[in-house]
Image (tube, coloured by chain):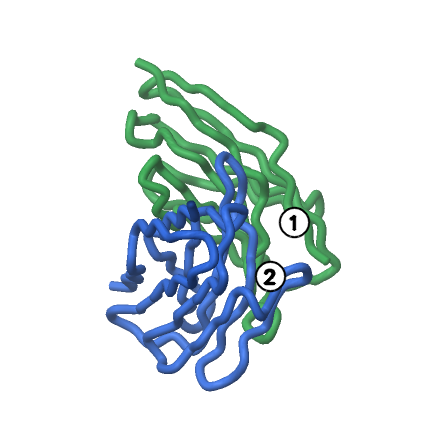
Amino acid sequence: GAVVSQHPSRVICKSGTSVKIECRSLDFQATTMFWYRQFPKQSLMLMATSNEGSKATYEQGVEKDKFLINHASLTLSTLTVTSAHPEDSSFYICSAQRVPYEQYFGPGTRLTVT
Amino acid sequence: AQTVTQSQPEMSVQEAETVTLSCTYDTSESDYYLFWYKQPPSRQMILVIRQEAYKQQNATENRFSVNFQKAAKSFSLKISDSQLGDAAMYFCAYRSPTGTASKLTFGTGTRLQVTL
């Protein structure tokens, strides 16, 4: 058990457009989900904490108007990168927390902005 | 704020041998969780092992075990009988007890190579 999916796995978009990434916990309910960004050969950087039914909590330095997070249900959180630019190209990973403490990670989404 | 340090950017081990990956952390909390995650080339993060700070006994999972030294704030991972499939990035992570501060703090990672 404890499977987390992400869709899409890869996306290419043009500069100035928006792209949505979905994160789903398939076999458990997750009141809390997390969004990370990972640059090549680097560690995971937490972007925001997503709580079902409430506003996301963003880490310092992360633009909340650019990275919109919605946690509409106990199994789905979405990250929308608005007005994407080439510097937003990265690998985005979500995780879902299963009580009491385990985080299970999705397979990641590679975003390329041209 | 908590910090996690992995001082070995890369390690290499021969197949069937044993290797130890180092991790130190800094915290003022007395209760917390520590994790080792594996990230293979597929980039899927996989939980390897978990240690609760209140437990003195070191966690073990098959070929993986930890050496948890709470006073020294050290949490090393030992991989025994290394296999080619163990080649990956390994991240040490810290987590506060369940609550609002439940996010993971990751170290910078150690790339493990397994040679024949």
Query: Disc 2 to disc 1, how far (Cα)?
Result: 11 Å
Between A62 and B60, the one lying in front of the other is A62
Q: Position of residue B70 (x, y in %)?
A: 65, 49
Q: Position of residue A92 (x, y in %)?
A: 43, 53
As drawn, the chain in green is B
Q: Which residue is mark 2?
A: B32
Check chain identity for marks 2 and 1: say if they share one.
yes
Residue type beneath disc 1? Lys
Q: Which residue is mark 1?
A: B70
Quadrant containing the N terminus of chain A is bottom left
What residue lies at 36% left-to-right and 42% top-to-bottom? B43
Residue type beneath disc 2? Tyr
Question: Which residue in the rendered view is the most extreme toward the bottom?
Answer: A53
Q: How many marks?
A: 2
Q: Position of residue B76 (x, y in %)?
A: 55, 38
Between A53 and A8, the one lying in front of the other is A8
Q: Is residue B16 left or right of residue A101?
A: left
Q: Position of residue B72 (x, y in %)?
A: 70, 43
Return the disc, 2 or 1, that comes first in the chain's sequence: 2
Quadrant containing the C terminus of chain A is top left
> Pointers 2 and 1 in contact (CB under 8 A)?
no
As drawn, the chain in blue is A
Label annotation for residue A100? none
